[in-house]
Amino acid sequence: MSSSLKPLVLHAHTTGPNPIKIAIALEKLGLPYSVKLWEFGDDSENGLKGSKFLAINENGRVPALEDPNTGVVSWESGAIMNYIRRKYDTNNQLGPQGKSEQDIVDFEKWEYFLLTTLGPMTGQTNWYRHYNETKNEDALNRYVAQTHRCYQVLEGQLKKTDGDSILPGGYTAVDAHYEPWVRQHAYAELSLDDYPLVSKWLKKYGETAEVKAAYKKIQDAAS
Ligand SMILES: N[C@@H](CCC(=O)N[C@@H](CS)C(=O)NCC(=O)O)C(=O)O
């Protein structure tokens, strides 16, 4: 991608999985970008719920992306990913690998399944496992079961490629969406032992240059 581009600004948090997806996509496309880290809480200067960040994303969550080349500000990882793909993925390195309507629908359904189901169920497992002020075993069990159900569904899909990529034809933005959330299985204290293809996919995709570089970029911003 052209070096004449001004660096995009990825707003992130050191531990949150959602910004990583966007960093993976930016790395894959070779786009210049910087990372601006925010804290949880409502500190007016540094907090995600503080006035400075709310002026960028009124929902007070990361990721958000500012593109000085176009003036576009986006938030919600799905919307950001779509923006990056429309604007910069001229060689289709992230989009559906086939052109049929079914290929496009398959891409979108797996993207939405992560955004609406696997991600939120994992997030709720984390919440009831680590953060809820009172112990709530019913809620925890519900979200653990739902997250396992999502892993089972993903395992079925990965049979199509023997665990190589979520959609046949190679890695796409769909893999970028899933990687940080499936990686969260360890923090959520959920075993992947029953999902060998999910484990295989996570390990192999985690070793790609774009995924390694994305994590490093966010770590480097924190140090
Ligand atoms: N649906 C949003 C979720 C964003 C989200 O929940 N981000 C987390 C970090 S991974 C966050 O900002 N949490 C801060 C908070 O809840 O205050 C997306 O996909 O971008």
Image (cartoon, rainbow, N blue to C red):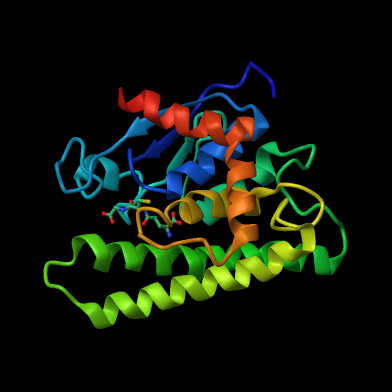
Residue 82 appears in the picture as rendered: no
Q: Residue at x 74, y 58 (%)?
A: 167
Q: Residue at x 19, y 45 (%)?
A: 50
- 203 with respect to 125 (left or right): right
Task: Give the quarter of the figure containing the C terminus.
Answer: top left
Task: Give the quarter of the figure containing the N terminus.
Answer: top right
Where's residue 116, x and y in %?
50, 69
Outermost front residue: 193
Outermost left residue: 134
Q: Residue at x 56, y 52 (%)?
A: 177
Q: How many marks?
A: 0
Q: Compare residues 186 and 41 and report the one nearer the observer.
A: 186
Q: Compare residues 204 and 90 and report the one nearer the observer.
A: 204
Q: Residue at x 56, y 24 (%)?
A: 32
Q: Classify residue 34 by image quadrant.
A: top left
- Figure check: 10 above or below 139: above
Locate ligand 1 by image quadrant. Answer: bottom left
Q: Classify residue 64 by image quadrant.
A: top left
- 100 with respect to 130 (left or right): right
Where's residue 119, x and y in %?
46, 62
Where's residue 125, x and y in %?
34, 67
Residue 194 appears in the picture as rendered: yes
Q: Compare residues 147 and 80 and report the one nearer the observer.
A: 147
- Figure check: 68 above or below 184: above
Where's residue 182, x and y in %?
50, 56
Outermost bottom residue: 138
- Figure check: 135 above or below 21: below
